[in-house]
């Protein structure tokens, strides 16, 4: 693909109703731009560093992505959704969304963090698990993005271990006191245990080869640290052994681990033995790999699974294999500003994907300098574009790898990070493609990706236990700055209400069909275009003797204005039901989201107490209208409504007349 040139100027444009930062350029005829064939690999480089991007962004090359025009929805042909709730049976739907994580362990003790953790326990029906990095790092409580420390381990002048649990207890105590449970991550390497302690810390944690990313200088001392942690928390929290979950490290296939792939297996063997000698019932998993579906011969995910089954156990000579209680990998979608345009020398990529190419293509000048601006030139307006299909293909690939090991057919799987892109700590001010985070687009993304992932797992025949959202909160940042968070300075974001809606899906899943659904065969087979040619108006339904719950979303990868989708929902009721009371919960720009109102206030960074109270009220989960009495017609309860792009609805249908 070639583009007419030339870059004349840049400005910022906000799309009404979306709050998107868009890049406006003027293109003029006359000079060609050549596509940079390596630009898609830049997708990862701007997300979690060049070390990660080199492997994860360069899957298929840089073929140009041409947007396919989508005709406006025809109001005369609404999306029709049918639900058969006449005879619900089987086990209740198993929630998988009550897992959350964040880098900055020292944020945990803040007032806003404590409030957010309590909110998470209130909106979820199952125990909430929290996963955080840097729990074992040396230092004194770094309160900064992508860092943290507890200083739990040091050595005296004679090399003897010294354990200090004061900071770690504050972090874990704040989680437990809020009603959450730790998904305790044994990471990263304490300085006095590191085989290469210097430099221990730099301002760029993605640089790799830092002291905290190294293997231990003494594996027995590492095992001793695990033993002491297990003893300490078994005594402090007697239920920790049976109710907490544990893991070793984070993403050992990239910069977080510089010790080599085999040595990660070795570290796991020592960790497993030490933990289970103290807590035999503790649930320990791994490897939380970043590139689970990589085709490389040294694929950490696949090789780790093989090691735990048949490999020589490093901690117990003569033993084959290692106990593995759950399997974990990570999945990122990818995002960019679209359509692609010139951006300085070679431009930058966006986000981070897992083996699929979704990065920004960059136009590179081939001839003369910038010509005189042409007032008649056609402006090109960029918008954020996501890649939810990349998550689903990654998850499907990883599930198939697990299914290839018959011994692990029933072993629980936790997707330790399931996110739209790769760097929660990069704001939308820095990366405009992250503008989705502040409002309903993030909410719709989460509903769509989690429910579809559950369907993909069922199709693959594996045991999905958890889908962890890597988002929490940041201290000391502006309101709605565009970090991947669940709240901003104590004000919940719309995405938080997605988990509240999904938690209302009680009872067994029942059949649901939507004429607006794209379907898994299409989504898993389109190579990146799955959610770009048309919106996905789909959902899930559950039912029991008391009624039915129907969750519906309207999702598309491209954040542009679009007409509402007219939706007709028909729920087949059990025999004898004469009607129902329908409560319609909704997330959109004006329901269960405070972002638009904050903009109307003038985007205050020092809102008054009255403004904060108003924003918190608007951020709470709310209904579209008052509960409605609906009579059955031909044995069905029918509801009609319009669903905006990125809207999420839940119909709570309570039977009457039984």
Image: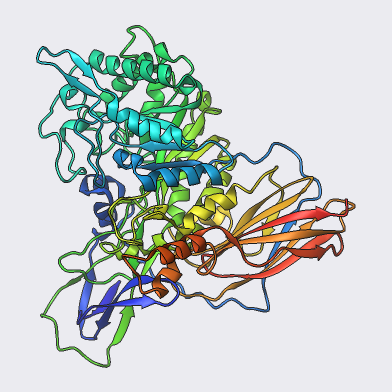
Residue 79: x %, y % from top left: 66, 68
Against 480, residue 207 (above or below) is above
Outermost residue to the bottom: 376
Against 126, residue 317 (above or below) is above
Outermost residue to the right: 576
Against 278, residue 655 (above or below) is below
Residue 215: x %, y % from top left: 21, 25
- Tell me the residue at 40%/11% (across/down): 277
Say which of 265 and 495 sits in front.
495
Say which of 59 and 200 sits in front.
200
Left or right, residue 189 beside residue 541 = left
Residue 281: x %, y % from top left: 49, 17
Q: Is residue 58 visible?
A: no
Residue 258: x %, y % from top left: 21, 32
Say which of 633 and 357 sits in front.
633
Q: Quadrant of residue 287?
A: top left
- Tell me the residue at 21%/49% (across/down): 50
Q: Quadrant of residue 595?
A: bottom left
């Amino acid at each position: 693909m070639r583009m007419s040139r030339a870059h004349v100027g840049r400005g910022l444009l906000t799309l009404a109703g979306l709050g998107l930062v868009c890049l406006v350029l003027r293109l003029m005829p006359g000079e060609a731009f050549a596509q940079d064939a390596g630009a898609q690999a830049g997708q990862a480089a701007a997300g979690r560093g060049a070390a990660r991007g080199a492997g994860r962004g360069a899957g298929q090359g840089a073929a140009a992505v041409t947007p396919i025009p989508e005709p406006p929805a025809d109001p005369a042909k609404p999306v029709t959704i049918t639900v058969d709730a006449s005879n619900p049976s089987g086990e209740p739907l198993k929630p998988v969304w009550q897992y959350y994580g964040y880098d900055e362990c020292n944020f945990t003790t803040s007032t806003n963090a404590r409030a957010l953790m309590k909110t998470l326990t209130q909106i979820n029906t199952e125990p909430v698990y929290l996963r955080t990095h840097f729990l074992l790092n040396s230092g004194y409580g770094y309160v900064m993005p992508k860092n943290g420390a507890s200083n739990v381990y040091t050595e005296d002048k004679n090399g003897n271990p010294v354990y200090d649990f004061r900071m770690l207890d504050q972090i874990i105590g704040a989680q437990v006191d809020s009603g959450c449970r730790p998904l305790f991550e044994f990471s990263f390497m304490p300085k006095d245990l590191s085989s290469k302690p210097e430099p221990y810390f730099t301002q760029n944690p993605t640089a790799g080869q830092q002291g905290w990313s190294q293997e231990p200088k003494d594996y027995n001392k590492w095992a001793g640290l695990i033993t002491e942690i297990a003893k300490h928390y078994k005594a402090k929290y007697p239920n920790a052994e049976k109710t907490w979950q544990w893991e070793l490290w984070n993403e050992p296939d990239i910069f977080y681990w510089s010790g080599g792939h085999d040595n990660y297996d070795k570290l796991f063997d020592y960790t497993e033995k030490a933990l289970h000698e103290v807590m035999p019932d503790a649930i320990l998993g791994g490897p939380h790999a970043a590139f689970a579906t990589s085709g490389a011969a040294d694929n950490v995910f696949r090789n780790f699974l093989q090691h735990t089954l048949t490999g020589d156990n490093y901690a117990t000579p003569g033993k084959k294999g290692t106990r593995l209680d759950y399997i974990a990998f990570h999945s990122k979608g990818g995002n960019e500003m679209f359509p692609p345009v010139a951006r300085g020398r070679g431009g930058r990529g966006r986000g981070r994907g897992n083996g699929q190419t979704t990065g920004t293509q960059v136009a590179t000048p081939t001839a003369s300098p910038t010509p005189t601006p042409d007032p008649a030139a056609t402006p090109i307006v960029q918008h954020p574009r996501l890649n939810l299909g990349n998550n689903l293909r990654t998850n499907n690939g990883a599930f198939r790898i697990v299914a290839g090991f018959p011994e692990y057919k029933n072993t629980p799987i936790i997707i330790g990070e399931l996110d739209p892109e790769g760097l929660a700590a990069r704001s939308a001010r820095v990366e405009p493609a992250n503008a989705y985070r502040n409002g309903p687009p993030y909410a719709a993304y989460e509903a769509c990706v989690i429910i579809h992932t559950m369907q993909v797992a069922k199709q693959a025949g594996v045991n999905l236990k958890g889908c962890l959202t890597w988002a929490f909160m940041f201290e000391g940042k502006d309101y709605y700055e565009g970090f991947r968070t669940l709240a901003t300075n104590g004000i919940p974001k719309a995405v938080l209400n997605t988990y509240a809606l999904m938690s209302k899906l009680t009872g067994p899943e029942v059949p649901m069909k939507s004429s607006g659904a794209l379907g898994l065969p299409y989504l898993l087979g389109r190579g990146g275009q799955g959610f770009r040619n048309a919106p996905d108006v789909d959902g899930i339904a559950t039912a029991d003797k008391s009624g039915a719950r129907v969750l519906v979303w309207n999702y598309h990868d491209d954040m542009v204005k679009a007409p509402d989708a007219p939706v007709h929902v028909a729920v087949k009721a059990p025999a004898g039901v004469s009607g129902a009371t329908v409560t319609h919960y909704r997330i959109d720009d004006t329901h269960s989201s405070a972002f638009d109102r904050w903009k109307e206030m003038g985007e205050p960074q020092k809102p008054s107490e009255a403004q904060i109270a108003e924003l918190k009220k608007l951020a709470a989960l709310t209904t579209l209208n008052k509960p409605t009495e609906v009579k059955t017609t031909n044995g069905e309860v029918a509801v009609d409504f319009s669903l905006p792009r990125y809207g999420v609805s839940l119909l709570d249908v309570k039977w009457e007349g039984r």
